[in-house]
Every structure is written in C-alpha cells, then in structure tokens.
Amino acid sequence: MTQGKQLCVIICVFALLAFGFPGTLSALDQSDSGFQAYLQSLWPRAEAAGVRRATFETAITGLTPDPSAPAASAKQPEFDKPLKAYLAEAVSTPRILRGRAALRRWSPELSHISQRFGVPPQIIVAAWGMETDFGAAKGGKDIVRTLGTLAYQRQDRALFGDEFIAALVILDKGLAPREKLKGSWAGAMGDPQFIPSAYLKYAASFDGSAFADIWDKPQDSLASIANFLRQSGWRPNLPWGMEVVLPPGFDFASLHRSFAAFKAQGVVNADGSPLRAEGDATLFLPSGAAGPAFLLSDNYWVLKAYNNSDSYALSLSLLADRINGGGELRGRWPAGEAFLSRADKSLIQRELQKRGLYSGAIDGRFGQASRDAIHAFQIAAKISPADGYGSQEVLRRLTQN
C-alpha cells in the first residue's frame, strides 16, 4: 500500500469514526480529572513515539475535554449528495474566479513548486480550493484538545490516540509551535487540512526552512499539497483524465482499456479533438451512458487519495480545468434522473456480493469496485448499455427473483 493510499485509509476511517458518535461525553466521566487520567494513560505510547515527558506534560496540563467535538453532523456531502448537485457547489463560478485569482497571485511560487514536485499548478490550487476554499474555512479549533477529546470519547479506537500523539511529536520536534496547531473539529489542520500524521509525512516549506507553515503561508500549503500528491503517486505530464464523447454504437464490453484502445474505438475529447494521453484509462459515466462521459487516468486515483470520493475527485479535476481556462462540461445531465438512496445502493452491493461479483464494503457508496460489479452484472443479464451505472433498472433486475 502506498503512503497516499495509507493516508486515504486514515482520512476515510477518521471521517467514518468521527462523524456521528453513538454517544456523547455524558457517557464518560466528564470531569477534568477523568479526562486528565485518560490523557496520562497515553504516556507510554507517547514515550514510545519519542515524545519527551516535559513536552507531554506541558501539552496536557490544564487541558479540558471539548464537548463540541463529538457533536458534529454525520452527513458527508461528497458521498450523500448527487454528483450533479455536488459539482454545482464545488465548481461554482465564485470558486473558479477565486481559483484563477490565486493562480495569478502565486504564479511564480506555483511555477517553482510544479517543477519541484511535477504537479500542475491548477491541480494544486484546485485542491486548496476544495479543502478550505483557498484558506477561508480552515477551522480554528485547538487540535490537541480536539484530538484528546476524540481519543477519550472513542477509547475503542487507537486512531484518535495515535493522531493526538502525532500532534505531540510535531511539538516535541519543534516542527510547529503550539499556538499554530489549529484546525477543524476532527483534527485536520491548516489550508491543506492535514491530520497530524499527514503533516509529519507531507508538510513541506516553500523555502526549505524547518517549519512548514500550512496555517499562514500559502506557499507552504501549496508545496505541501504538491508533495502529498507526488508521494501518493502523481505522474508528471499525465492529465487527470478528460471529458469525452462516445461514438454511436460504442462497445461497452469493458470499462478499462488503454487510451489508445479507446481512441481506436472512436472516443474523442469533448471538443472533438483526438485523444493524446497515454497509458491505461477507465471510462466513468456518473449518470450512465445518457450523461457526461469521462476517461480517467492513473492520476485521478491519486486525487482520490486525498478524499476517497468520486464526487470530490471529479470536482477537484474539473475545478482545476476551469481555473486553467477550460470551459464548462459539454455533456448534459439526464433530465429527471432517478437517484438511488443509500439503502438502495447497499441492497445492490449486497445482491452483487451474493452473485460473487462484488467483495467490497456494503456501505451504499458506489466507487469503481461497485461500478465494475454492476457492469459485470449488466453484461451477464444482457442489460444495455452496460455502462456500470447503478440505475433503478439494475436494482429491479437484481431483486426481481
């Protein structure tokens, strides 16, 4: 597993565990002494991570639990909102304009960062926009207190305690001062929204100094985002993918071919120009064959290492294109599209699993594994077109017997 995929797992598990706790702090000893006793119990783990006792004591002295930490919403729009609606908000005209302004403002620095890490400036800026709206929504919570609270609340999960200790490692190594460790309620920090372990792995200063200030120096945030993507496997000179047009009579026998093979089938860029990308590609039809079509390169999956959601990754990609001067989508979303509920999607996954076509999580979230399983079922059931789209028809056919 690559470092990027490891971080993706951490971030996704973090979200799943932190959103919607089964209880609140009332289920535990809410007193300062109870909280402090728990924090003291973390000392052996902190010591094993190399944290000095003085650093540990300074960090936890006077720390009180934050009752707001486990009270956040359980909703995750990148998974629950229809992609069309998610895109409309994520790739809005105001955000595009702010992104273009950021691209101009930081052009010299972005040019240097892009040469250093091999990631295009517009991709870096788009990730910044997706994470914190270019620094406008990075959060101001004390993440040491927040992570200590989350670790206390979910003592059955080591992850929060690990991130609390990672924050102490940052302090112990002098990588960032205590007053800088601010972020979201779930412990994600600064403009890139790095959790502490991600900061330790990927934070990079623009000028090579020891302190990567992802809170107040945009050039450090941009370098850190680029470093994360490069270490996660970003391939220079390869686009994330592109919007395409499928020819009449397109053969849906496979959703995975090389760009050359798709080109040979008559697939062209949405503007009518020939495909020029190299390597493997995946055909992605988020609303089925009747909606916009995309070919995804290996770099698209790197973007999903930041947030394992197609809505997020596709929005980031299209935002980058728009920031770089590209036009709107040419494909049209189907009118009156009937969206499946999370329960319906889970039922589809369960039925596909029964048929040996799917082995992933039954979570009502369709990723590529779900789309591939749906595609295989469509081929077997002679449903045309076999576009990998989880439709009402697929649900009906899977459950009719």
Image (cartoon, helix red, strand yellow):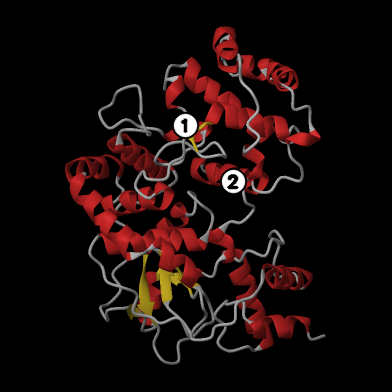
Residue 6 in picture, x, y percent from top left: 56, 42
Secondary structure at badge 2 equals helix
Inspect the image, locate mark 1, and give the three-letter code of the amino acid beneath it.
Answer: Lys
Q: Residue at x 49, y 54 (%)?
A: 304
How packed is label 1: few (under 14 Cα within 10 Å), some, or many (20 or more)?
Answer: many
Q: Is residue 82 left or right of residue 42?
A: left
Residue 318 in picture, x, y percent from top left: 36, 64
Which of these two is toward me, 230 or 260?
Answer: 230
Classify 258 as above or below 136. Answer: below
- Quarter of the image for residue 93 reads bottom left
Residue 221 in picture, x, y percent from top left: 34, 38
Give the residue at mark 1.
Answer: 182
Secondary structure at badge 1 equals strand
Which of these two is toward me, 72 or 237?
Answer: 72
Classify 87 as above or below 394. Answer: above
User: Could you tell me if residue 278 is visible in this image?
Assistant: no
Q: CA distance from mark 2 to mark 1?
A: 22 Å
Work out which quarter of the rendered image holds the N terminus and state it. Answer: top right
Identify the mark at residue 9; answer none if there is no mark: 2
Q: Residue at x 63, y 27 (%)?
A: 148
Work out which quarter of the rendered image holds the C terminus and state it. Answer: bottom right
How packed is label 2: few (under 14 Cα within 10 Å), some, or many (20 or more)?
Answer: some
Classify 380 as above or below 360. Answer: below
Residue 398 in picture, x, y percent from top left: 74, 81
- Quarter of the image for residue 61 reads top right
